Image (cartoon, helix red, strand yellow):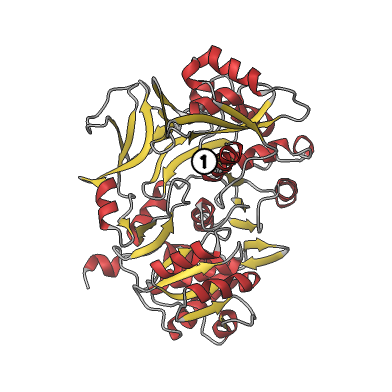
Amino acid sequence: MTTAARTFRTYVEENLDVLSADPAREALVHQGRRVTAGEFRALVHRLARALRARGVERGTTVTLLSGNLPETLAARYAANLIGARVNHLYNKLSAESQAAIVRDVETRALIVDPRYAERTARVTELAPVPDVLVLGPAKLGADLLDLAAGQSDEPFAARARPDDVCTIRHTGGTTGHPKGICTTFEQVRRHHEGMEQKRETARRQLVCTTLAHAAGAMADRTLHAGGTVVLLDDFDPGTVLATIARERITEMFLLPPLLYQLMDHPDAPHTDTSSLQMLSYGGCQASPARIADAIRLFGPVLMQGYGQNEAGGVSVLSREDHDPGRPDRLRSAGKVLPGVEVEIRDEAGRALPAGGHGQVCVRSATIMKGYWKQPELTAEVLRDGWLHTGDIGFLDDEGYLTIVDRLKDMIVVVGGHVYTTELEDLLNSHPQVRQSAVFGVRDADRMERVHAAVVRAPGSEVDALQLRAMVSAERGAMYEPHRVTFVEALPLTDAGKPDKKELRRRAEQEAGTLA
């Protein structure tokens, strides 16, 4: 074993040290249940021994099919302490998709939330696994908490090595089949270091999106800072507002569509959100007009983070940069983080000057190790140490990065390209439009047509002709939507992003019916 391997400490060990320093403090809250730092730490060590006794070893895969429970975090910590890699399934994927992932990552043990017992039965029927372990009593599998109760809570010696795979995160599949993104223990630790931010008061983080996504990493950082993580099972705007007030929440993360739902809830203007110090958002494009509304509602607490599972964190638009009077600045993804290099490259791979639109390429210590068992795909996006993100963007003269589209979302039309996010920003600027999603649909001649799904503000009477006329006047005929569809709400992926695959499917189905 090398000296580096002996002295290396994982994010789990660092967090357990913090938990040990003040074992009586409140670390996690879920449905009125309050878990102390000492209780959580003891559970992690017991779970590690229980998993080890069931055959989970360094280099094996543990898959989580679980909601936002304290035990979910503890199980992840325990598996990583052993040196196992962890894959956390999105709960709202189909059973068939979940089973494909379970099989693909060579799952040694499937750790299950008792509330998902029926789904587990279906998944394991399609993809049998050596061991099903349940976070509580259930008809299927062994009760992992019961097994852990008989184990010692003395510190379990970590077995992970810096270059071992810590997590396999699957892409949301918004642009294709989900891909397994491998991140090492060293990269996870560096990512946490790079995103640390000091607070003047104790952190109280609200998790109301899945722990399988960005909120899980943020929960790790909150625990590392000696803070408290308050867990909700799912996002409900009224419940979130009430929890912010009751638990005096200081920070939270939302995807933009969920932020809009929070702002639009009738309780929002009357709820005490004065405890909020940071409301971070990201994961998909945000509307500058709506973000300006959020600043006016919640105060100067908004922060945008741009990154990818493949790349880690790339840039941040700070709270100071959130000026409602600067929609151009709100449109950007902020300044590139320290230790991260960004180049904008054209189709030939040449670096472009400031203002030039091209693919965002990133180099840093936190970019992924590669895609799980897909060397050819890895070689496509990782070249000469640079990750080719698949995002189109530009850097301005002041060093602010703006993302204008995904390469796969960009619509190729007669006369040029339509950047979907630019059209969404324009539609969202209409006072009677609450939200929009723009996507391309091929017609019978296989030509792409611009489609827009629009959520109108309550009582709005704006129609498709008015919106198309506005777009034509502002951006020209090339950007004018071929079809505008009004919907009550945009469909969202499990991570909370607008589901353009589903919108495209609906539009194609409708076109087929009309034909």
| Residue situated in front as seen by the camera: 66 or 23 | 66
> In what element is the residue under mark 1?
loop
Residue 114 drawn above or below residue 476:
below
Most extreme residue toward the top is: 473
Q: Is residue 49 visible?
A: yes
In the image, what residue occupies the spot 50% across and 51% down?
A: 214
In the image, what residue occupies the spot 63% across and 46% down?
A: 250
Residue 251: x and y in percent read 60, 46
Q: Which image quarter holds the N terminus?
A: bottom left
Find residue 509 and report its image quarter: top right
Most extreme residue toward the front is: 515
Q: Which residue is mark 1?
A: 282
Q: Which image quarter holds the C terminus?
A: top right
Residue 349 drawn above or below residue 8:
above
Residue 267: x and y in percent read 78, 40
Residue 61: x and y in percent read 40, 71
Q: Could you tell whether 99 is left or right of 206 in the image?
A: left
Find residue 103 and report its image quarter: bottom left
In the image, what residue occupies the spot 60% across and 84% down?
A: 146
